[in-house]
Image: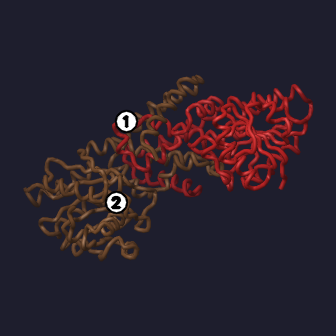
Chain colours: A red, B brown
Amino acid sequence: MRRWDTVAIIGVGLIGGSIGLALRKLKLAKQVIGIGRRKSSLSKALARGCVTKTTTSIARGVKGADLIVVCTPVEQIPDHVSEAAAHCPKDCLITDAGSTKSQLVHAIESTLAVRSSERLPFVGSHAIAGSEKTGPEAARADLFAGRVVVITPTSRSDAEAVSAIEAFWQSLQARVIRLSPEEHDAALAATSHLPHLLASALAMATRDELLPLTGTGWQDTTRVAAGDPELWRQIFLANPGHTLKALDDFETVLSRFRTALKIADGSLLAMLLAEGKRRRDAVGS
Amino acid sequence: MRRWDTVAIIGVGLIGGSIGLALRKLKLAKQVIGIGRRKSSLSKALARGCVTKTTTSIARGVKGADLIVVCTPVEQIPDHVSEAAAHCPKDCLITDAGSTKSQLVHAIESTLAVRSSERLPFVGSHAIAGSEKTGPEAARADLFAGRVVVITPTSRSDAEAVSAIEAFWQSLQARVIRLSPEEHDAALAATSHLPHLLASALAMATRDELLPLTGTGWQDTTRVAAGDPELWRQIFLANPGHTLKALDDFETVLSRFRTALKIADGSLLAMLLAEGKRRRDAVGS
């Protein structure tokens, strides 16, 4: 298991804070530098033991790093990677934890390729370990244990960097899957972005006076709608095409339920419900 | 707080079993008779302390009861109430715990009214305390604590019976709301039946090969799809009109999300997500 000398984490929220906690708990890094804009978040991350040192300057924070993980909202990731790459040591590896990949990986690779004709030390990542909770106070050292992390190497990625980033997530006890950025975005549109859209729309469609009549079913089904609207605005805008496609596929299935209700077809309903249950049971928890 | 001599519970699953556990824990009934078709469920309910005695015969089980609670699947409730009413003492009260009310309350009242010109001792109930779990093994004495129970009296209901059924649920620490059966079904279509439909459709729309890429968001949003397809088939068929209406209202909201994605309107998206979050946060947990 590779032990890092200095890992710099840009953005010490739930994901960044959890990476720091895990690195420290598993003794995988001597130093973890927390880099962020807000001093209050940095202080919380330091107090919780997510990081060993903090700074608001990316340039200073990445100076001695051998690994940089960018955990900021998706719209900021390209700029943060670019700034980090300009100030870090030559052999430093860079990854991110953005929930969408296609737009941002291509933006990052275009920027980095201008500076160097070599294979790029950046590999995109997405840890499927989110929560409607945010901030370093929600961070957990075991957030990635048993969870899937998708890494999205491209033809421009340095092969050793890809292996090292894969090993990094595995050292945090995650299961790593390799997909292209496009494949990632198509898959996550169906498994994450569409569920969020439906949860938000369902919460919004429930009139205020009916809220006292909601139970655990409504609460579960709408839980992610409590997530940060700004983070999710950015995610949707970075993956609108695949999300719309996933929504169309969903509507096709939904129309079968609608038909079954309209014509009171009990056996069709039972079949649809059983098929939904089979998929849900396959995932568990 | 009224203490009952003998409460008969027809159907000792999650809801029936929890009523029994609560009655016994709070010392609100001397005897709790568990009535069911399957001896295995009855034995489990007895072993867990949900009931003090069991029988597979409704006629025998309700003979000495002063309260009967029918907790079977919605399609069976009218027959079970009718059979119970034919064999219970004259002053025995009857309620149920069905997730839909309009069809079954009217069916029950029509049957009971043939036998008696008096006000009816039956009052419909629905405890909004479900779960995707089923069976007496999932029963909890505090299942109703702080939860809402809707009771659905009609012009045919005996006023004292209504008060007594209300007090019964309150004694299990529930908050009781009175609605007409129609009002109940319209409200629950939006707060329970539609969420279940969406969860099932979402689970079904997620292709098997994508299931490893699901996270807590998908898991929460689809959780209720793990519920019993047969129970839910019955619920949907007992409330198709209101569920279709709730689905139409949902589609209207969803089309605004669709538009925002299509034209990449970030401020509309942010507004919709914020409004969904406001409603979700208002409910909590």
Classify residue A68 by image quadrant.
top right
Q: How crowded is the residue under tag 1: few (<14 C-alpha within 10 Å), some, or many (20+)?
A: few
Q: Which residue is drawn at the image coordinates 55% and 26% (left, top)?
A: B260
- State which quadrant residue A155 falls in: top right
Q: Nearer the viewer, residue A211 or B219?
A: A211
Which chain hosts label 1?
A: A
Q: Is residue A220 above or below residue A112?
A: below
**Residue B133's spot in the image, x, y percent?**
45, 60
Q: Position of residue A275 (x, y in %)?
A: 52, 54
Query: Do labels 1 and 2 touch, CB within 8 Å?
Result: no
Closer-to-camera residue (B103/A218): A218
Report, in whole angstroms, how far the alpha carbon at label 1 lies from the one at label 2.
Answer: 29 Å
Do the residues marked 1 and 2 share a common chain?
A: no
Q: Which residue is mark 1?
A: A208
Q: Nearer the viewer, mark 1 or mark 2?
A: 1
Image quadrant containing the N terminus of chain B: bottom left
Count how many numbered circles sit on residues in the image. Answer: 2
Residue A36 appears left or right of A244: right
- Amino acid under disc 1: Asp
Name the residue furthest right: A117
Residue A185 seen by the camera:
no
Question: How far across and down, in percent of the image, does residue A270 sit?
Answer: 44, 54
Residue A49 visible, this angle: yes
* Mark 2: amino acid: Pro
Q: Position of residue B56 (x, y in %)?
A: 30, 75
- The chain letter for the residue carrying disc 2 is B
In this view, the residue in front, B54 or A229, is A229
The residue that label 2 is drawn on is B73
Give the left or right position of residue A14, taking residue A163 as reference. Answer: left
> Which disc number belongs to residue A108?
none
